[in-house]
Image (spheres, helix red, strand yellow):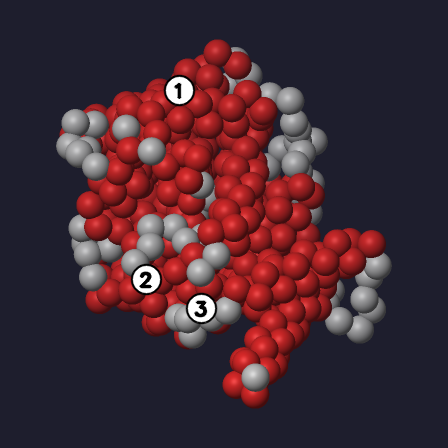
Amino acid sequence: MNISIFIFCIFLLQFVCFWVSRKSFEALATKEDYFLAGRALRFFPLAMTFIATQVGGGLVLGASEEAYQFGWTVLLYPLGASLGLFLLGSSIGMRLASFPVTTVAQIFETAYGSKRLKEIASFLSVLSLFMIFVAQLIASKKLMVMLGVESNLLFILFWAIVISYTAMGGFKAVVATDMVQASFFIVIFIIAFLASFFGKAAPLLNEGLLPEANLTGASKLLGWIFMPLLFMLIEQDMAQRCFAAASPKVIRKASLFAALSTFLISLIPIYFGTLAREIGVAPKENGSILVEMIQLTTNPWITALAGAAILAAIISTADSLINAITSNLSQDFEIFAKKFENLKFSKITTALLASLGLFISFYFDNIVDLLIQSYELSVYCLFIPILMALFKPRGNKLSAALAILFGALAFVFCKIIAIPFLPKEIACLFSSSIGFLIGEYLSSLKKEAIKIG
């Protein structure tokens, strides 16, 4: 691979992102501008920021690694993300946008009348988003090292550019740069696929070495499809885009377009992963099977561009996470509310949180288990009460509280004891549902008692 081309590409792309986002630096007048882009996003920018947020390190590097182990069954992973986008476009996203809120956690105050539950939900959201952000940083560092860029100074300088335009321009800057980075990685991924498919990989494909599916456990399959699907419906960075849309019609069109695009884009890393599996290419220690296969079946220039494209996909997910985390902190906790009215404070907080994540990334090598647990915990605790609020705008606080409690208890229980006849995803969501129904039942008894009294 041509390291000089890779370094030139990644820094040029970020300077372009800084340039296109500069207009947003001084166009911010209110907190709503900073976190929701004035609620004026149209179809194309909304669709591209949906794609950029979903096609990150997990869907690119993670999907290729899983495809190397299990073949085409890993399609369930991007399918889950695509179905989540489809549901956002068909009904969920429009219902979210209809609430007079700016974060998902605020639904607990609007629908259930509880500020405490709002803060609990926001804390869980912040925890999940921050850990995902740190995971993106670690993935980018490993990628750069694997491609021959081992300088910590270059790594810090690179992310300093990303953090600066994200902090200074807020959500408007995120959307502007998402359009640039998503366009770049889509084009480069397609070029890499075509160069491989019709180039050095062609003889292998002509020999009939087509990847076959390798079925795995039911729990893993359910995790692939349901975790990204359910988490998407409750995560702040996706809801933030729905809140920022100009109209429900725009949400529907943009999310449906993004659903199809995300699924099609994910076929490319899965293709490289399954091809490596079939021809017996063993990944190097701490290496990426995706990068190794692109290098094996294309040329040094395309490999360098593909490396930059993968990094762009990681960044386009990371910058939205930074802004979403600050959005939660600024609007869900009364202790911070007045301070965040000052846009300068919002910008400084965004920069500090991102810098904290950058610092943490140097001291952790593998946080996958912690990442998955925080990811799952949010889903198990929050999905049921949020889903019910979308269809029953005036719920009761007890039902939501018990749903969160039962979801958390089931999460802990399933970590200690494996349930042989039931996947943990189903068990935990079922437990949360039981908690919600118990709350509904107790509330109905209380109403009856009041009537009789």
Mark in front: 2 vs 1: 2
Residue to which mark 3 is pinned: 389
Residue type indicated by callout 1: Ala
Secondary structure of the residue carrying tag 2 is loop
Residue to which mark 2 is pinned: 99
Identify the residue at the far bottom of this view: 452
N-terminal of the two: label 3 or label 2? 2
Residue type indicated by callout 3: Ala
Can residue 280 be seen here? The reply is: yes
Secondary structure of the residue carrying tag 3 is helix
- Within 10 angstroms of label 1, few (less than 14), some, or many (20 or more) residues? some
Residue at 48% across / 11% down in the picture?
153
Residue type indicated by callout 2: Phe
| Percent of width and height locating residue 85 | 40, 62
Can residue 74 be seen here? The reply is: no
Residue to which mark 1 is pinned: 160
Alpha carbon separation for disc pair 3 and 1: 40 Å
| Percent of width and height locating residue 78 | 50, 58
